Amino acid sequence: MNHDLSPLIHRLSGTPLAIWAETLPGQLADKIARSHGDLPRWQAAVEALPALTAESIELADNLVLQGTCSEGERAQLDTALRGLIPWRKGPFDLFGVKVDTEWRSDWKWQRLAPHLSLQGRRVLDVGCGNGYYMWRMLGAGAETVIGVDPNWLFHNQFHAVKRFLPEHPAWHLPFALEELPPRLEGFDTVFSMGVLYHRRSPIDHLLELRDCLVKGGELVLETLVVEGDEFTALVPEDRYARMRNVWFLPSVPALARWLRRAGFVDVRCVDVSVTPVEEQRATEWMRFQSLPDFLDPQDHSRTLEGLPAPTRAILLARKP
Ligand SMILES: Nc1ncnc2c1ncn2[C@@H]1O[C@H](C[S@+](CC[C@H]([NH3+])C(=O)[O-])CC(=O)[O-])[C@@H](O)[C@H]1O
């Protein structure tokens, strides 16, 4: 697997991120040395990918790579990619192998993309998963995209795609946001999608995101919300839609207030959508239970726990 970060270091030289970038190869090597479990198996799956060249690359309207690929190579590709199951975020069409992921992440991107202007921007995607959106951000004109996510499977899924896009300026770092140095202040746009509700201290999360941005930079925040006024936030007693580790589900007005308290300005909500069961479901690439199993079978407006069904909002805000 290509873990060479020198192109990233070169790219970030002369920016506020240069000193941090120099430390990354050491940190990454340290992480790999301390990792355990399935990492060798996943790395072997990435190594088993056939050597194919993407002759046609679609990242703007979809994620489709095409190029010369024999039937034998396609079978080899399919087998290697299945070695990285479960695939949650996507879908990917890689040389005719259609990775039908748990999530139709392209639908969220369609809701979000009209509100973004990423041309020439240096972007951080916090909780980037397998990097699906990172590729779409490049398709929308971003200059450099760095994703952080501590999950090793997702890191390897990212590298499976990067293998066919080696020159594209996207880097996936297997780190949690809290592992980044404080006050990086080097990104033009920071994304946090699907992360805030996992945080016990949501305002601290917003402050950490703000500290990653340059002055005038933009935050794109997507999270679960509930209906209500600026005083409303739901804290589940235990699980939410079977998920452990869900803490705060604010209303949109409450979330906007949190953002203002965290020092953001120009806070605006650009989308609120109830997640349909067609957007998050089990597929042959993700065989575990999914959203349809987490909702009340008699009433899809409620979770199994009797709480409001997942509704997600996208808010944009600026660091002054
Ligand atoms: N402290 C942390 N720092 C960084 N990443 C974290 C942290 N904690 C959890 N994660 C990561 O955040 C991601 C949350 S999923 C959103 C994926 C994508 N953004 C999406 O919008 O589809 C949730 C969802 O399915 O919506 C997971 O990949 C975690 O490993």
Image (cartoon, grey):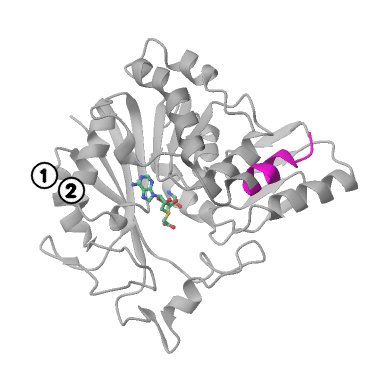
Residue at 67%, 66% in the rendered image: 284
User: Residue 203, labelled with which disc?
Assistant: 2
Q: Number of callouts in the render? A: 2
Q: Label 2 sits on what residue type? A: Ile
**Residue 80 x, y percent position in the rendering:** 73, 49
Which is more toward the observer, 245 or 35?
35
- Spot the residue most to the top: 14
Residue at 19%, 39% in the rendered image: 207
Other residues around mark 2 within 10 Å, as few (<14) / some (14–19) / many (≥20): some
Q: Main secondary structure of the magenta part?
A: helix
Q: Which residue is the site of mark 1?
A: 261
Image marks 2 and 1: residues in contact by CB distance under 8 Å:
yes
The boundaries of the magenta stretch are: 41-51
Q: Would residue 59 be found to the left or right of residue 68 on screen? A: left
**Residue 110 x, y percent position in the rendering:** 49, 50
**Residue 276 x, y percent position in the rendering:** 47, 69
Q: Of the residues tagged 2 and 1, which is closer to the observer?
A: 2
Other residues around mark 1 within 10 Å, as few (<14) / some (14–19) / many (≥20): few
User: Dividing the picture into quarters, in which one does residue 192 lie?
Assistant: top left
Which is more toward the observer, 29 or 51?
29
Q: Would residue 268 be found to the left or right of residue 92 on screen? A: left
